[in-house]
Amino acid sequence: MASAWRCMLVTALLSFVHGASPVHAVCNKTVGTRTFEQCQDLAALGATYAWSLNNDTNSVDFAFSEDMQVTGGWIGWGINPTKGPNMEGTQALIAFKNGTSLIVMEYDVTNAVKDGAPLLPTLVSVKYSNLSAVMVKTTVTIFGTFPLGAGKAATVDHVWNRGRSVNPITFELAEHPLAPANLASVGTVDLATGIASVVGPPHQKLENAHGVISAVAWGILVPIGVMAARYLRPFPWADPLWFYLHITCQLTGYTLGVVGWGLGLQLQKYASPIKYFHRNVGISIFVFATLQVLAMVLRPKRGSKHRRYWNMYHHTVGYATIILSIVNIFEGLDLLQPESKWKDAYIGVLVALAVIAALLETAAWVAWLRRSKGRIPESPPPPHLGSKAKDALEP
Ligand SMILES: *[C@@H]1O[C@H](CO)[C@@H](O)[C@H](O)[C@H]1NC(C)=O
Ligand SMILES: *[C@@H]1O[C@H](CO)[C@@H](O)[C@H](O)[C@H]1NC(C)=O
Ligand SMILES: *[C@@H]1O[C@H](CO)[C@@H](O)[C@H](O)[C@H]1NC(C)=O
Ligand SMILES: *[C@@H]1O[C@H](CO)[C@@H](O)[C@H](O)[C@H]1NC(C)=O
């Protein structure tokens, strides 16, 4: 029992620490006992980089610092001399604990590694020298020196990351997490001027566009369109207004949604591994929504005996689409892990829509009960069945 409580307490503390906003590193030209000419906060993972140019030897002394988070993990930094600010091709220096001592080893992050081959220590093409590492709490600093091409610009493409474990025998590195910060930890810096160009991963903009467009289309416009149909339809004054609102929201939502869906299909090129659940739910939403648009065209005439079945079908597929959309938006938020304000904002919109729907639902039922003047119905129909509103497509 006591251990169960301890376990719960530890879990609660861990989740608190985990949920706390990450400490933003501030670079310091003085690192340990050494002082460098310049320093810089890197774009992701709270890492910092300090360096000095040795003009006479044409080399760079540097100190790279990053929080390893767990003592058994690894942190790494490296120059990518051939493929720009990308993981593939990086000539990496990795620091981790070998028993009790902190060591630095070289790793060549080849194309095969990107495809899943184990990442093992090997010689690299960049002639790093004078390597050492120190650890203060869980923050590790790698010190070293590397040569600059004589007479060449002092601009380097560099990449950094961290992971949670290292094989103690082979020194194979466990893969780093695939959270956005771990994918954005690349950059280019001009060591002479200290000017950094921050480059997000090439698909960051695509991800953002996919997320925002899809959430607005499927997660906001389409539910509002359904609410327009359900709650305005009973009122004679709102006929055929409700229908035009409904069809405008749904067609705008569908058009934008298909754009967002197309961007999502593009994103699959970068997804590693492919997010099958999110993809399959996305495809289902597209199919259902397309059926809804086609159903408009194939709708039986009002008064036709098939019209009741058509209505049931239209409503069922519509509600299923909305439920799938909401599920997939939260799934997408978990995959992209944007700042928490985006998830909070979407939850806020959903709650607002739900409160409005609940109020309108109550109002519609009260109005319906009043109209039926004390007649106690066995099972009151949904509000729109009591409506005498015309079918607005044939107004
Ligand atoms: C930088 O680090 C040195 C030595 O660790 C420390 O004395 C100094 O206060 C730090 N400067 C800043 C701005 O944090
Ligand atoms: C090396 O050269 C750079 C740019 O040419 C200059 O900013 C820096 O002060 C020089 N460093 C030393 C130690 O002379
Ligand atoms: C790792 O530690 C073991 C045992 O202490 C030692 O024999 C080995 O040389 C170390 N390896 C490296 C690369 O430092
Ligand atoms: C090597 O590193 C030490 C500190 O670890 C530093 O004092 C020294 O200047 C470095 N040597 C070269 C050649 O960069």
Image (cartoon, rainbow, N blue to C red):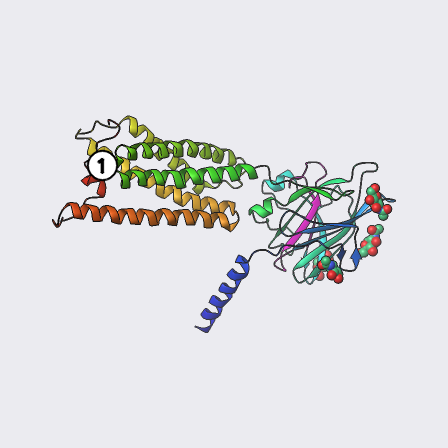
Residue at screen point 24% across, 46% down: 364
Q: In this image, 318 relative to 168: left or right?
A: left
Q: What element carries label 1?
A: helix
| Residue 343 visible at all | yes
- Image quarter of residue 134: bottom right
Instruction: Give the quarter of the figure containing the C terminus.
Output: top left
Q: In this image, 124 relative to 350: left or right?
A: right
- Residue 182, position in %: x, y? 59, 47
Q: Give the range drawn in magenta.
A: 68-95
Residue 51 versus residue 203 in the image, above or below: below
Residue 94: in magenta span: yes
Most extreme residue toward the left, as rendered?
Answer: 375
Residue at screen point 41% across, 35% down: 283
Residue at screen point 38% across, 48% down: 352
Q: In this image, 95 relative to 251: left or right?
A: right
- Residue 346, position in %: x, y? 44, 47
- Residue 302, position in %: x, y? 20, 29
User: From the Cβ of disc 1, is ligand 1 less than 8 Å away?
Assistant: no
State whether the magenta stretch is mostly helix, strand or loop.
loop
Please name the residue that numbered disc 1 is placed on: 236
